[in-house]
Image: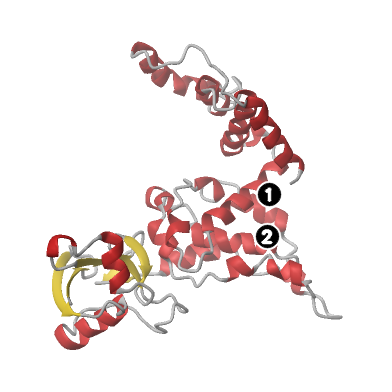
Amino acid sequence: MQVIFKIRRQKQDKSSWVQSYTLDVESGNTILDCLNRIKWEQDGSLTFRKNCRNTICGSCGMKINGRSALACKENIGSEIEKFSLAANGNIPEIMIAPFGNLPVVKDLVVDMKPFWDDLERVEPYISTNARNIPEREFLQTPEERSQLNQMGNCIMCGACYSECNAKEVNAGFVGPHALAKAYRMIADTRDSDTENRLENYNSTDGVWGCTRCYFCNAVCPMEVAPMDQIGKIKQEILPRHEANDSRSIRHRKVMIELVKDGGWVDERKFGLFVVGNYFKDLKGLLSLAPLGLRMLTRGKFPTSFDASEGTEEVRSIIEAIQQNR
């Protein structure tokens, strides 16, 4: 069968363009197989990274039909079926582009330096003091070691980083890959720097910068679920802080309080409590005034609040979870 590959090509600091290549393929061929053939048979100038071909090294990361993936893992048949590319008898077209959130070096090759720099910011290695045990090894039980397995599966391919909405709007955000590794350090019983780590991650450049879009979970080829690991770090941070400590902490705590009270969020109180810090932050309150006035003039401001059905059940579930942490 024939497939048209539309590949976004680019030279460093130049505008990109799309170049099309037609190839006879089998449904079981991987995207990487096809890129190899294009390079070997049609255009030797096409540039991309590859290495193991077995979903181990993470080198061949790129955007395939709009989502970040490994070219060695995705095959022609699944792409055509997933996106109904052969509808109406047309020749299927597969779109290939470089990763997002990283500068393009050439074609499908991106500069991974920002990715590695962000990883270094979370200090993804066991603390020196924890390694300083001269008498014997630092042994872990099988149960303790099993807590590290999911995060340890990360192959640093960059797919989550490429898809991250938070990174796209906030260059300072450390990224889902780094925070998944960060939770591995927190969960590791050999590490002795947990409190400092949690303080370092307690910011909008850390865990509170995550927009919870789930894209990192959706594209991770190793099921590391970075967003889940970010949530676990948040749960470690919250009990250590009061609502007054920061707006990020307050956002989470106020939401839980309001849901416990009414089964869902009372929007009238939410902004006042979070931005206005329970009426203590005059600057925050004043910043809400323009929005409040616009809502009032357009009849969008709710004048009352009705608790949802099953509020008592919701409250009991939240309290049970809080007691069993």
| Residue 207 locus on image (x, y percent) | 55, 49
Residue 254 in sight: yes
Where residue 186 is drawn, which disc sits there?
2
Residue name at image x 42 percent, y 53 percent? 167
| Farthest right residue in view | 135
Q: Earlier in the sequence, mark 1 or mark 2?
A: 2
Crowd tier of the residue under label 2, counting other residues whose Cα lies within 10 Å: few below 14, some 14–19, many 20 or above: many
Q: Which sits in the foreground, 325 or 202?
A: 325
Above or below residue 254? Residue 35 is below
Between 68 and 237, the one lying in front of the other is 68
Q: Please, what secondary structure does the residue beneath circle 2 have?
A: helix
Quadrant of the drawing holding the N terminus: bottom left
Residue at 79 percent of width and 75 percent of height:
138
Q: Is residue 163 left or right of residue 148?
A: left
Q: Position of residue 86 (x, y in %)?
A: 19, 65
Name which quarter of the figure residue 140 lies in.
bottom right
Total numbered badges shown on the rendered structure: 2
Does residue 4 sit above or below 310 in this rendering? Answer: below
